[in-house]
Amino acid sequence: MSNPKSRRAQSIIKPDRDRRFVTEDNPFEAMMSRFDDAARRLNLEPGLYKVLRSPEKQIIVSVPIQRDSGEIEVYTGIRVLHNTSRGPAKGGIRFDLAVTLDEVNALAAWMTWKCAVVNLPFGGGKGGVICDPSTMSVAELERLTRRYTAEIIEILGPDSDVPAPDVNTNERVMAWIMDTYSMHKGHTVTAVVTGKPVEMGGSLGRKDATGRGCLVVTRQALSRLKIAVKGASVAVQGFGNVGSTAARLMAADGMKVVAVSDKHGGIYSAKGLDIKKVLSWTAEHRFLEGFPGAKSITNEELLALKVDVLVPAAMENVINSKNAPDIKAKIICEGANGPTTAKADTILEKKGIFVIPDILANAGGVTVSYFEWVQDRGGYFWDEEMVNERLVKIMSKAFDEVAAMAEKHSVSMRTASYMLAIDRVAAMHRMRGLYA
Ligand code: NAD
């Protein structure tokens, strides 16, 4: 591992071998193929390649709980630490029937690259419990959370593994984890999880952080493409936490948000939507459908709009080899995780579309989670202005670093973001050496 140049990775990196994820619409396949490509371009040593591809720790636990009926049910819980060379593992916990070890492994690796690209002192982790929370009472969810926490308690901790909310978990679940961990330690340890309620050590600005990060990197991309921020046209797919915040902040910044959508479809107005009014509408009616004064469009139509900026902020694989040829946006800011398949990447690149990749574009969330951890550990809390100011600084710097890497190696922003991330994690491994 100590001689990066002499031993080339080519002999080890055979992208078509050792593939567990094999279809276009598997986002983890997309992530791993990008990892392989970036590792090859970096001439990553074969030994390090093997280390970075392997999760450090995979824990599978039984989580027995008593249902409200009095019956005992046993669930399966997983926690994976992919790489902790740069700091404690950071990554969400999901409660879902679709949780598998493969998926958790891939999501944990994804977090390693995301944290490294914005240069946070964190590694990557992820966890989950295979369950259907929609069939469980709040009391059952609390018992599940506390027992899962107790089962994985040895790896949890502000210095080792710091979970956050993910699919079907929220700040209430984080509060239970924090309490359970603290009861075991005998004192309050707020920094063991992020995404907590503000009253118990959460950070101001966390809710808007991912959308705000999207705004920051979109502004920079517009500036590189010499498109004025004022009046730049934007279409946003997904009107949840990320999409609605990005739309609101972009509109407040002078951009013209012409279309937004949710899972039932979208709304369009060539002269720009009044996002404040759209937010009031969804607060009352939940979905966008029926919003007055705008034309209805489908999600597919939204993706193909002729706009300056397209923000896919809903789900994975929405831009794929079938619809990529129809995309007319000049910039794509990936608010969602994995919205573009690897095949679509090639098409978008040929069309000259500037893609701000997910591990950079939506890293604002984990960045403010990092601020939460820092504030909890320091016991000193910042106002929202300071949180936002520091978020802007980190996101802007990361964008510039990825862009510089892209220019240096004549690669896309996507490939450059993986190269930057892998380079940082690999550098840490080289400096630390291999513990025998
Ligand atoms: P959310 O549940 O708050 O919102 C999701 C939105 O997408 C909703 O408006 C929903 O109606 C819409 N949607 C669902 N299916 C759709 C479909 N088939 N077509 C169009 N729209 C659809 O979720 P969120 O927290 O905003 O997360 C969105 C994406 O961003 C996810 O990929 C998530 O992993 C990613 N992300 C979120 C954060 C965060 O801080 N919340 C951070 C990083 C990445």
Image (cartoon, rainbow, N blue to C red):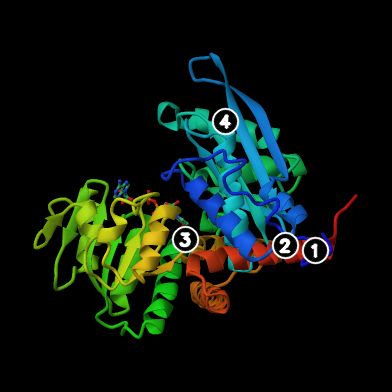
Q: In this orientation, which residue lies closer to the viewer: 175 or 254?
A: 254
Q: Relative to residue 352, is residue 137 drawn left or right?
A: right
Mark 4 or 2, nearer chain start: 4
Q: Is mark 3 within 8 Å of ligand 1?
A: yes
Mark 3 or 4, nearer chain start: 4
Hey, what amino acid is under mark 1?
Answer: Arg
- Residue 30, image x and y in percent? 49, 50
Q: Calculate the distance from the C-alpha at mark 4 to the C-alpha at mark 2.
A: 37 Å
Mark 1 or 3, nearer chain start: 3
Hey, what amino acid is under mark 4?
Answer: Leu
Give the labeled residue for mark 3: 358
- Residue 353, image x and y in percent? 36, 70
Q: Is residue 99 shown to the viewer in this render?
A: yes
Tell me, for residue 426, which label it has, or none.
Answer: 2
Hey, what amino acid is under mark 2?
Answer: Ala
Secondary element at image label 2? helix
The reply to whether the C-beta atoms of the residues labelled 1 and 2 are less than 8 Å apart is: yes
Disc 1 or disc 4, which is closer to the eye? 1
Hey, what amino acid is under mark 3?
Answer: Asp
Q: Dot 2: within a 10 Å radius of its alpha carbon, few (fewer than 14), some, or many (20 or more) residues? A: many
Secondary element at image label 1? helix
Give the labeled residue for mark 4: 144
Q: Calculate the distance from the C-alpha at mark 1 to the C-alpha at mark 3.
A: 27 Å
